[in-house]
Image: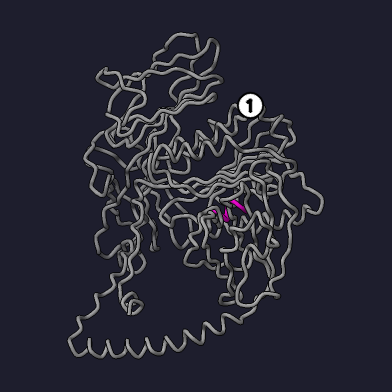
């Protein structure tokens, strides 16, 4: 009866994140090959990755980390940033990364895409950042052709899922194959960065963060430390700034003080100011900052260069007003109006429009050509006109660009060919089910009883079949010592010898130290899949995301899981193949 009641319940979906306040799902794929010991002696790449984590919104963004050589050395599932402790947990993980021999870019790209395929939130903006210091250096048994094939497949999957892959090449020895990184970024709609100095990495990661969220890095000032406090003005241009990220990138730690526009000293840290510091950077994140000029005081060691930048996070969505339903003709002027929304309401902050560059992008659907027309911004919003040049269909988008951000409206389509104006489609509302009378309820109950009886018979038959059903394919198993980083040679286990079920403990040759894995059970599933049931306290990850398998989860050919054991400091990687 519970099953019937559940089937009768209406389905619900999660609300999407407002377009004006985007959330991101980012995977940082970091080259930890031993060559980085020379190109990045002080592990500045780790500091840059931690800066990216600190710049993420105080709540809502999700970040994962993949550390690769020619294999995955360590991996951190997508972790939602809810508290400062979440960010600290991720940064502590980064500090513990070890380095190993060989390099295979395809491994780093493929695994990062897998993490997002299996763990990304559909309402978030996905992205991958790939960091490397050189070309492939493959171990015996792996050919460049195999690596290229894996890379091509990973890029195609990223394109299908609209996952941009930003690439960073640390070209310390001048041997970097820049064209490969350009290809990865270019084909996925991202950007490639190359630098010869690890000191540039924090600034590059800041730019990638801003670019991906349609924000801009605003240079503030570059100081030379002198051992005394130096004053810097920090401008908060309007009341719609949600977070102001002040990054200070330097070779040594700095000391800071901050005063608000009224001249009152701000406690560092406090409930409205998040403070993080390392040997390579300091970040001040002001939450809901007051509009006006803030005073930052910076003390650095003598002769140390300190670069100070700003990234503003905004809760702003650009909305175009609906066009009138009328007959459009060639040569006619279309009146265009747009305005900002914040928190779902029309923004009342006139300062937003003062220094705004507004443009109408009009695309001719027939020819594919686009034309940009300047618009006027004022206290009431954005306005202008567009003269229809031909009897074609057109797609109109308003773009607004400020010193700190870029926003675009949803596209609006109109037709000067058919004479019908069209506005953006609205979600189709599903009609509410009709109310049922008492008679219908009785027959529903009788029908439910018949269904339950039939289900009981089928269930018994199903259990008998499952107990005797065989398996196909095989699994590949590796065991990693989490203290030393050493891995066993991959072991292949054919599954056709099992009937009904098998355990992970059996796959591990019933070794006594792995006794807890006897309650990690695999059963045959539909279409030659495996049904995984976890009856232990072990943590299981799939694609970088924790897999809740107490009630069963399906594994298909090509799926890979990682099991973190509880009784010993080891992990087991298992891949199901046919």
What residue is at 68 percent from the left and 47 percent from the top? Answer: 105
Indicate left or right for 186 with 248 as reference.
right
Q: Picture coordinates of residue 553 (x, y %)?
A: 51, 66
Q: Picture coordinates of residue 321 (x, y %)?
A: 26, 53
Q: Nearer the viewer, residue 407 or 28?
A: 28
Relative height, residue 10 to residue 192 (above, below)? below
Relative height, residue 410 to residue 526 (above, below)? above
Indicate whether residue 560 is drawn in magenta: no
**What is the residue that sits farthest to the right in this orientation?**
140
Q: Nearer the viewer, residue 328 or 472?
A: 472
Q: Main secondary structure of the magenta part?
A: helix
Q: Which residues are magenta?
A: 110-115
Mark 1, residue position: 42
Q: Residues within 10 Å of mark 1 (few under 14, many from 20)?
A: some
What residue is at 57 percent from the left and 63 percent from the top? Answer: 520
Indicate left or right for 474 with 92 as reference.
right
Residue 254 visible (yes or no): yes
**Judging from the image, what secondary structure is the residue with disc 1 in?**
loop
Indicate left or right for 553 with 491 as reference.
left
Q: Quadrant of the C terminus?
A: bottom right
The number of numbered discs placed on residues in the rendered structure image is 1
Relative height, residue 505 to residue 262 (above, below)? below
Q: Quadrant of residue 468?
A: bottom right
What residue is at 42 percent from the left and 11 percent from the top? Answer: 229
Q: Nearer the viewer, residue 324 or 199?
A: 199
């Amino acid at each position: 009866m519970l099953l019937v009641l559940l089937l009768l319940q209406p389905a619900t979906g999660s609300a999407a994140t407002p377009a004006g306040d985007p959330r991101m799902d980012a995977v940082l794929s970091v080259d930890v090959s031993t060559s980085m010991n020379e190109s990045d002696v002080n592990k500045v790449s780790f500091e840059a990755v931690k800066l990216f984590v600190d710049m993420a919104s105080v709540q809502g963004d999700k970040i994962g980390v993949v550390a690769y050589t020619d294999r995955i050395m360590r991996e951190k599932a997508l972790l939602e940033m809810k508290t400062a402790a979440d960010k600290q947990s991720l940064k502590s993980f980064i500090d513990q990364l070890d380095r190993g021999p060989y390099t295979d870019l395809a491994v780093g790209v493929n695994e990062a895409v897998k993490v997002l395929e299996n763990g990304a939130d559909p309402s978030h903006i996905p992205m991958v950042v790939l960091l490397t210091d050189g070309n492939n250096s493959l171990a015996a048994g792996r050919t460049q052709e195999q690596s290229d094939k894996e890379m091509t497949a990973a890029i195609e999957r990223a394109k299908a899922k609209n996952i941009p892959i930003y690439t960073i090449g640390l070209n310390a020895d001048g041997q970097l194959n820049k064209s490969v990184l350009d290809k990865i970024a270019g084909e996925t709609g991202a950007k490639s960065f190359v630098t010869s100095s690890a000191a540039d990495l924090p600034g590059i990661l800041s730019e990638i963060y801003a670019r991906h969220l349609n924000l801009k890095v605003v240079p503030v000032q570059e100081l030379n430390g002198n051992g005394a406090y130096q004053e810097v003005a920090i401008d908060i241009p309007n009341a719609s700034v949600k977070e102001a990220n002040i990054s200070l990138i330097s070779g040594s730690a700095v000391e800071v003080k901050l005063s608000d526009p009224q001249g009152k000293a701000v406690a560092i840290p406090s409930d409205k100011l998040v403070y993080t510091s390392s040997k390579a950077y300091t970040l001040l994140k002001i939450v809901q900052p007051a509009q006006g000029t803030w005073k930052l005081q910076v003390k650095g060691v003598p002769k140390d260069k300190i670069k100070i930048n700003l990234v503003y996070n905004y809760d702003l969505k650009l909305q175009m007003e609906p066009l009138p339903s009328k007959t459009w003709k060639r040569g006619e002027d279309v009146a265009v109006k747009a305005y900002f929304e914040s928190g779902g309401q029309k923004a009342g902050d006139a300062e937003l429009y003062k220094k705004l560059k507004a443009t109408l992008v009009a695309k001719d659907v027939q020819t594919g050509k686009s034309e940009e027309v300047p618009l006027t911004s004022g206290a009431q919003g954005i306005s202008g006109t567009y003269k229809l040049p031909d009897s074609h269909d057109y797609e109109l988008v308003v773009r607004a660009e400020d010193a700190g951000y870029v926003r675009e409206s949803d596209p609006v389509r109109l037709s000067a060919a058919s004479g019908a104006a069209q506005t953006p489609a609205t979600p189709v509302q599903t009609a509410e089910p009709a109310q049922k009378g008492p008679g219908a309820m009785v027959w529903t109950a009788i029908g439910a009883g018949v269904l339950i009886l039939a289900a009981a018979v089928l269930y018994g038959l199903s259990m008998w079949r499952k107990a005797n059903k065989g398996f196909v394919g095989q699994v590949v198993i590796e065991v990693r010592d989490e203290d030393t980083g050493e891995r066993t040679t991959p072991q292949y286990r054919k599954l056709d010898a099992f009937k009904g079920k098998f355990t992970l403990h059996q796959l591990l040759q019933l070794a006594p130290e792995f006794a807890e894995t006897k309650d990690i059970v695999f059963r045959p599933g539909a279409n030659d899949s495996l049904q995984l049931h976890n009856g232990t306290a072990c943590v299981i990850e799939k694609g970088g995301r924790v897999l809740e398998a107490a009630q069963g989860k399906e594994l298909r050919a090509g799926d890979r899981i990682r099991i973190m054991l509880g009784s010993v400091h080891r992990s087991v990687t298992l891949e199901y193949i046919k």
